[in-house]
Image (cartoon, rainbow, N blue to C red):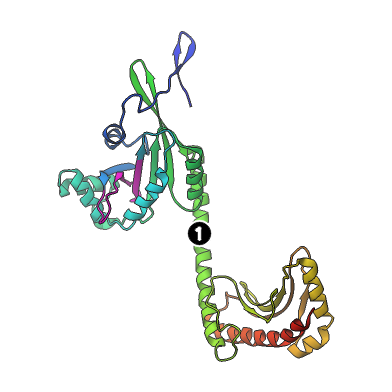
Amino acid sequence: MALFTINNDKLESVPLTSYSQEAILERKHLQLLLKNHIAPLAPDLMVLCEEFSDWEDSSRRIDLLCLSKDANLVVVEIKRSEDGGHMELQAIRYAAMVSSMTLEQAVAAHARDKGGDHELATKEILEFLEVGSLDAIELSDDVRIILAASNFSDELVTSVMWLNKSGLDITCVRLAPYKFDGKILIDATQIVPLPEASHYEIKIRNQTNEIRKVKSARHEIFRKFWAQLIERARAKTSLFANRTTSSDHWLSAGIGRSGYVLNLILTEDQSRVECVIRLKEGKEASLAAFQRLQAQKEPLESHFGAPLEWQELPGRLSCRISKDVGAGWRSPEQDWSGLQDELIESAIKLEATFRGPIEKLP
C-alpha cells in the first residue's frame, strides 16, 4: 500500500520508512504507543497489562495482554521487523499459557499495571465489559491473538491463514511507517483476515468447529464400541486378541496371508464383515485372486452359511467379499452387545471360510 498527498492537483507519494531507520524501538516506543492507544489494532480491546509473565519457570513475556468486549483474553505480539519473524509461533505458545486464566487473575494483572490498586482495576474492567459484578462474567478459554508488525512474510501469512482455518483466531495488522513533513505516519491495516471477508471467515471457522466437534464425538463412539467388542471377543476368538481400540470406523484382523485383510465395518446405519483383497502387485493381481475365490462361490457360501456380496470394485486397487450384519453406530448403546456378538460371530465364520482357500491360492 502507498500513501499520497495532493499537491497542486497532483498526487505525490509519501515515502515509506522503517522503524530502525527512525530509531523507533519495539518495547520502548511501539509497545508504549499501542498500550496507550490500542484502537489501531482492534476497536473492542482494553489493555490489561504489558510485559505479562505471571507463570512459573518461564522468563517469557507477552507484549500486551488485553481483554475483549466478549470477555476473551487477547495476546498482542509486536515486532518492528519487516517480515514478522516467527511471531505467530511465539504468540500461540503465550495463548496456550494464559488459556486457563481466570477473571480474578486478569483483574490482578491489571491491578499490578495500576500500581497495585485492585479496586481501580476492577472498576475499569467492569466498566469496559458493561456489567455490574465480576460474578456475571467468565473468561473464555478461546484466546485471540493479534500480531502487529511493519510487514509480514508470505510464510507467516500462509501459516496464519491455515491456523485460522483450523480453528484459531489470529489477526495480522500491518503497521507501516511513512515519513512526511518531518513527521512519522503509521498506516495500520488489517491484512489477515481481510476486513471485508472477516464475517465470512468467522462463519466458515464456526462451521468447521462444529464439524470437528461432531467428528470428535463420533470418534469417541467408535473407541468405546471397539473397546467393548475386543473385550467380548476374547472368550470366543483370537482374531482381535492383539488389537487395541480405534477411533476409525473399521477394525481389522489378519486372515493368514499378506494382502488379505478381515475387516469389521461400522457406518452410521449399517455394519458388515468383509474380506478385502489388495495385493502389492496391483489391481490385476488382486482381481485374479478375487476371481479364483469367486469360482468357488457356491461351496464357500455354503460353508459360511449365507450368501455373500462379491464386489470387484472397479476403479479401486482392492476387491471385496462382504456380508451385511446389522445396525450401525447410531443404534442405542443398550443394543451394542447384540450387534457386537453378531459381528464377532460373522468374523469368525468369514475367517474360517476363507483362510484355507486363501492359503491355497498361487
Q: Nearer the viewer, residue 328 or 129?
A: 328
Residue range highlighted in magenta: 53-77
Q: Amino acid at mark 1?
A: Glu
Look at the image and tell me whether residue 295 can be seen: yes
Whether residue 69 is visible to the viewer of this picture, yes or no, is no
Name the element at disc 1.
helix
Query: Left or right: 313 with respect to 93?
Result: right
Is 67 part of what is drawn in magenta?
Answer: yes
- In this view, the residue farthest toward the front is 362
Judged from this view, the residue extending furthest toward the right is 295
Q: Who is closer to the viewer here, 351 or 45?
A: 351
The residue located at (64%, 88%) in the rendering is 345
Q: Quadrant of residue 256?
A: bottom right
Structural crowding at the residue carrying mark 1, measured as other residues with C-alpha within 10 Å and reported as few (<14), some (14–19) or many (≥20):
few
Residue 51 picture location, percent across and down: 26, 44
> Which residue corresponds to mark 1?
210
Q: Which residue ends up furthest to the top in the rendered image?
A: 8
Specify whether 76 is left or right of 104. Answer: right
